[in-house]
Amino acid sequence: MRDLKGNNLGTVLLVILVAAVFAPTLVHAKDYTVGVKAGDWVKYGQITVTWTGNGTEPSSVTDAKKLDWVRIDVLSVAGTTANLNLTAHYNNGTQTFQNYDTDVQSGSAGPAYLVASNLTSGDPISPQTPEITINQTVTRLYAGANRNVNIIDAKSSYQGYLSETQFYWDQDTGIMVELYTNQTDYTNPGAYEEVSLKATETNLWSANVLDLIQNNLIYIIAGIAVIIVIVAATIVLRRRKTPSPQQPPPPSGPPLPPS
């Protein structure tokens, strides 16, 4: 295992998580409460990292593409502050670690892994930034169960550099369950970095078989239809290849006299 520190870790996290311009503002939430406890965790096992453009791909993107999974563990909670540990596991078996303190009431400079619990559509993330509010609350499937999630779609443009970031937080707990970001590569204005990650495992809720069936019903029906078609085609082909039974030849010569 190796422990990344300083600029290296900061660069990788910038690509994986959020544009730094949003980090100081998205975690302020006066009088809001923490919805997780020590021992809670979320694992993000569905990670996609792409870079589009001419020139050389940044090393931060190259490193991020090697990620196998990312996990957030809640180490402790004191009042409105949660101490979080981030583990980044790479496909070669190595891991990196980083620790964050996130105060959901007064705000902290850590990435927006956690916000206050039980926010609803229209609620501001921070009283200091009332223009940044929850856009909508919807139901989506995460870690095997349908969850109500709060969404913020943040877009910005500065001197030709574009950035779009979508945050998804579980409403009950405030933990981040999904992130999507697409932004201009600041070292190459003609290139774009696109990152997404999604929660696939957690101890905060249990997987629900009915939710899995409901959200994948169209794929289940399609799979059954394909199986039916294959079975029917197999039966037809077998019938065509099976020769029809032959009748025995008629007896030759005159009939024998009765005995």
Image: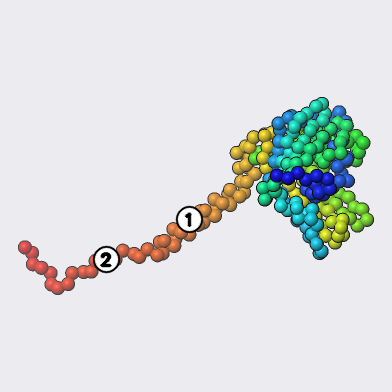
Query: Viewer-nearest of labels 2 and 1?
Result: 1
As drawn, is 220 to the left or to the right of 123? Answer: left
Q: Residue placed at 62% from the left, 49% from the top?
A: 218
Q: Residue at x 84, y 48 (%)?
A: 7
Q: Amino acid at mark 1?
A: Val
Q: Residue at x 65, y 44 (%)?
A: 215
What percent of the width, then of the height, locates residue 30? 88, 31
Q: Is residue 81 above or below residue 70?
A: above
Residue 101: give x, y in percent of width and height. 82, 34
Instruction: Name the residue that disc number 2 marks.
Output: 247
Report which quarter residue 23 is drawn in. Answer: top right
Secondary structure type for disc 1 = helix
Residue 109, labelled with which disc?
none
In percent of width and height, residue 113 lies at: 79, 39
Q: In the rendered image, is residue 138 in sight?
A: no
The reply to whether dot 2 and dot 1 touch (C-beta < 8 Å) is no
- Mark 2 vs 1, N-terminal side: 1
Judge whether 93 appears above or below 58 on screen.
above
Q: Nearer the viewer, residue 152 or 245?
A: 152
Q: Counting other residues with Cα less than 10 Å from the Cα at mark 1, is it few (<14), some (14-19), or many (20 or more)?
A: few
Identify the image quadrant of the C terminus. bottom left
Q: What residue is shown with label 1?
A: 231
Q: Which one is nearer the viewer's eye here, 243 or 21? A: 21
Task: Establish if 70 lies above or below 227.
Answer: above
Front one among 181 and 239: 181
Name the kind of residue labelled 2 in the image: Gln
Q: Single out the residue that lies furthest toward the front.
A: 2
Q: Position of residue 241 (x, y in %)?
A: 40, 65
Q: Nearer the viewer, residue 164 or 101?
A: 101
Q: Secondary structure at mark 2?
A: loop
Camera sees residue 127: yes
